[in-house]
């Protein structure tokens, strides 16, 4: 049975699938030489499930199983009393899926973040790409979602 793609808030039932996605994601980042911390991820899950204001974790599921996750926070700019802005800390998709399916899931997560940011009247949403490899693929997807490049992330 094909239930297709669904975007929703992260739930406790997603922990196992999202953990696997995050392990995959970690292995592709500039931080891949650091040991993956289940303990730290468990603390993040606890925080997310407490639904603190100014934080969201969105899950895309495919056929009823979590296939991607986006985690973001909203805060004000440090030099302004203006509106909130959103910082997306991670968008991770199940790398075992086909490239087309991964792209659809990625774009659905960006759309979910956009909807959340709009509900907060946020002025900007910043998405960080920290893979350090295969940067062109996420760049194309982020641009396809309507984002504009405003700077870079540098590692020393």
Image (spheres, rainbow, N blue to C red):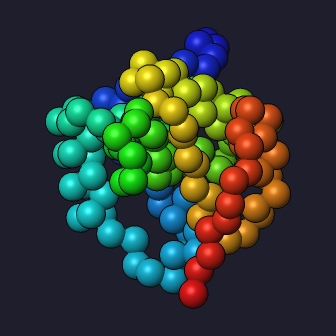
Image coords of residue 147 (percent x, y): 71, 39
Query: Quadrant of the image for the C terminus?
Result: bottom right
The residue closer to the viewer here, 121 or 136, is 121
The residue closer to the viewer here, 75 or 136, is 75
Query: Quadrant of the image for the N terminus?
Result: top right
- Residue 46, can we see it? yes
Q: How many labels does the image show?
A: 0
- Residue at the spot x=21%, y=55% of the render? 43
- Residue at the spot x=51%, y=83% of the render? 33
The residue closer to the viewer here, 103 or 4, is 103
Q: Would residue 13 be found to the left or right of residue 23 on screen?
A: left
On screen, residue 124 above or below 139? above
Q: Would residue 105 be found to the left or right of residue 78 on screen?
A: right
Q: Would residue 121 be found to the left or right of residue 152 on screen?
A: left
- Residue 57, can we see it? no
- Residue at the spot x=79%, y=35% of the render? 144
Image coords of residue 125 (percent x, y): 54, 40
Image coords of residue 105 (percent x, y): 64, 32
Where residue 24 sits, quadrant-wise, is bottom right
- Residue at the spot x=67%, y=71% of the render? 132
On screen, residue 51 above or below 131? above
Where residue 111 sits, quadrant-wise, is top right
The residue closer to the viewer here, 152 or 42, is 152
């Amino acid at each position: 049975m094909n239930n297709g793609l669904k975007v929703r808030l992260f739930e406790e039932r997603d922990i196992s699938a999202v953990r696997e996605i995050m392990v995959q994601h970690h292995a592709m980042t500039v931080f891949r030489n650091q040991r993956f911390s289940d303990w730290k991820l468990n603390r993040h899950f606890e925080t997310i499930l407490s639904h603190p204001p100014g934080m969201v974790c969105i899950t895309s599921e495919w056929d009823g199983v979590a296939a991607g996750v986006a985690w973001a926070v909203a805060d004000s700019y440090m030099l302004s009393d203006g509106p909130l802005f959103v910082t997306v800390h991670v968008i991770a998709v199940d790398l075992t899926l086909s490239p087309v399916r991964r792209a659809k899931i990625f774009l659905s997560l960006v759309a979910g973040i956009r909807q959340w940011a709009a509900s907060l009247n946020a002025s900007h949403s910043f998405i960080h790409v920290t893979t350090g490899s295969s940067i062109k693929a996420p760049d194309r997807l982020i641009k396809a979602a309507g984002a504009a490049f405003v700077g870079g992330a540098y590692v020393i």
